[in-house]
Amino acid sequence: MARQKKQVVFVDAYAAWCGPCKDLKAQTFTNAGVAAYFNAHFINVSMDMEKGDGVGFADQFAVDSYPTLLFIDSNGQILKKSEGFLDAAQLLALANQVTLDNSVSNK
């Protein structure tokens, strides 16, 4: 899907018991600006790293703290990795950097 749409995949790697993960979902991801930007520029995935496919994903991408936010290109390469809570402004700044870097590298 990422190749087809020529978009970066954004992964919210979380654990159900993680307080900062819950804050990220309740405060940051619900921000209208964040939601609009991410829906327009990324394929968004939220995955529990302790259940199902999340366990293998955590091993593959070395996720060992929560929350971990990953921006992954269509070849499965990590473009950017961030660990810990980010507020809306911080997450948008990170996403803008990924979008800018990705658009430059695709030229």
Image (cartoon, helix red, strand yellow):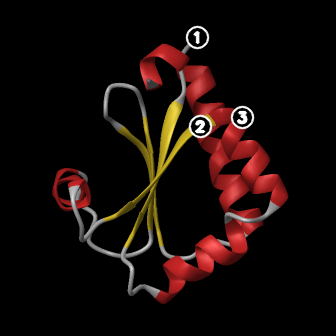
Label 1: element kind: loop
Cα gap from disc 2 to disc 3, whole angstroms: 6 Å
| Residue visible at 43% across and 18% down in the picture | 3
Crowding near the residue tagged with mark 1, few <14, some 14–19, many ≥20 C-alpha atoms within 10 Å: few
**Residue 75 vertical placement versus 106 (above, below):** below
Cα gap from disc 2 to disc 1, whole angstroms: 18 Å
Amino acid type at image mark 2 = Phe
Amino acid type at image mark 1 = Lys
Can residue 96 be seen by looking at this rendering? no
Tell me which numbered mark, 3 or 1, is placed earlier along the sequence.
Answer: 3
Q: Which quadrant is home to the N terminus?
A: top left
Q: Position of residue 29 (x, y in %)?
A: 67, 63
- Looking at this view, is 10 or 51 the one in front? 51
* Residue furthest out toward the top: 107
Q: Which quadrant is home to the C terminus?
A: top right
- Looking at this view, is 44 or 51 the one in front? 51
Give the labeled residue for mark 1. 107
Question: Where, by quadrant of the figure, is residue 100 drawn?
Answer: top right
Q: Position of residue 25 (x, y in %)?
A: 61, 71
Q: Nearer the viewer, mark 2 or mark 1?
A: 2
**Residue 77 vertical placement versus 48 (above, below):** above
Instruction: Please give left or right for residue 88 compared with residue 5 in the image.
Output: right
Instruction: Please give left or right for residue 77 compared with residue 39 in the image.
Output: left
| Residue visible at 39% across and 79% down in the picture | 16
Question: Which dot marks residue 40?
Answer: 3
- Looking at this view, is 73 or 55 the one in front? 55
Question: Which dot marks residue 59?
Answer: none
Tell me which numbered mark, 2 or 1, is placed earlier along the sequence.
Answer: 2
Give the labeled residue for mark 2. 42
Cα gap from disc 3 to disc 1, whole angstroms: 20 Å
Crowding near the residue tagged with mark 2, few <14, some 14–19, many ≥20 C-alpha atoms within 10 Å: many
